[in-house]
Amino acid sequence: MIRRDLVSHINILLKEFPAVALLGPRQVGKTTLVKGIAENQPHKPIYFDLEDDADLNRLKDPGFIFNQYQDNCIVLDEVQRMPELFTLLRPAIDKHRQPGRFILTGSASPAFVKGVSESLAGRIAFTELAPVNLLEAINSKLSQQKHWFRGGFPLALTASNDEAFRRWAENFIRTYIERDLSFLFGVSLSEKVIRNFLYMLAAQQGGIWNAESYARALGVNANTVKRYLEFLEGAFLVRQLNAWYVNATKRLVKAPKIYLRDSGLLHILNRVPSSKQLPLQLIVGASWEGYVIEQVSQLKPEHIDLYYYRTHNGAECDLLLVSGLRPVMAVQIKYSSNPSVSRGFYTVMDDLKLDRGFVIVPEREGYKLDEKVDVGGIEYFLTEVLDELAE
């Protein structure tokens, strides 16, 4: 059993908000986590799985259920199946405002779910359960190499061997393509387009987004490709890393970079046969970059936002940490045991008036590359450097 660090944060939210929504991709462990949390709440939980027809029948009159069980903790699992519930939650909460009345889970961002229009501002807190992060894996005695190769989905990460992991991941991808994406968002999506699009994104991990280029390759228009990208992002499978161009005087690249969030799914889509073979694959550098960005995204302080920076003259950094409107650190991500930093990286630091840079590598304790730039492993960066920024 992998202990998830989000539990304590959810318990805090349940003491402050009438409703708490836990969002994340399918098979990430939301239901298991929520059931455990609900059992420890002061009010007896009542559980509804909205993908179970029997539970849907029990919830034919949601307003009556909400009124009848005002003093219970009502768990609504996979709430995107009934988006009209958001409309009914507002009056129910306003009539009997009590912390921890509702726990919702969802496998799709509400912003992309057809029919969700009701605002629950001030009544609900949203939080995301992402796949298992590196620190959670290490605390569960799982190695960084295994976590990087298999990704963070619990059943993939704890599979008995790499072949079992592969079978799980291939079927997970197939189910998402053939059924889940259309089901989650209440729209009809082309399986062929989604499949080809996913493979293209995996092959170009960390590539700069160009809708027209993808549209030509897929034989669809640019608006269709943008819509499909939104759905993949709304299902928590894809991350867009925006470019930083605030107050810039130079010609900058402004399109976002696109990453598949889970490294295990990335490796399956790129046909990487094993963790031992990963360093020999062409995708290894892009895979390491996406893996690091996902770990930093999950574990960064709340006041830090992430961007990348690139000029048309070639100056760039893979990751720019920004507090408010002030860049605080430039980061380069290198799959190397003896990294060097390009002149363009120092140009970024000069452009943005940064006095601190960092190079993240796979395995190494922190050391200084020069007066302004440090080098260290991802675990060191997550536990030491991000902690400093949080202070």
Image (cartoon, rainbow, N blue to C red):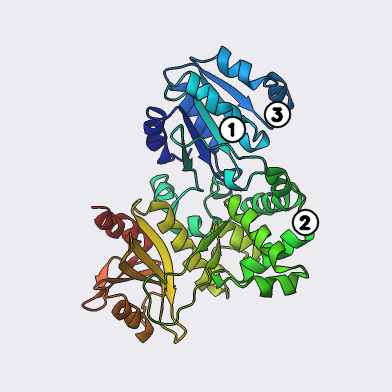
Could you tell me which residue is drawn at 40 percent across and 41 percent down? 5
Q: Is residue 189 left or right of residue 85?
A: right
Q: How many marks?
A: 3
> The residue tagged with tag 1: helix, strand or loop?
helix
Q: Is residue 193 left or right of residue 369?
A: right
Could you tell me which residue is drawn at 66 percent across and 40 percent down? 115
Q: Which residue is mark 1?
A: 86
What's the distance in space between the residues labelled 2 and 1, CA to CA?
29 Å
Q: Is residue 35 left or right of residue 172?
A: left
Residue 380, placed above or below residue 282 = above
Q: Amino acid at mark 1?
A: Phe
Q: Which residue is mark 3?
A: 52
Residue 81 lies, in percent from the top left, at 67, 36
In terms of depth relative to the viewer, which is nearer, 343 or 379? 343
Q: Which residue is mark 2?
A: 191
* Neighbours of disc 3 within 10 Å: few (<14), some (14-19), many (20+): few
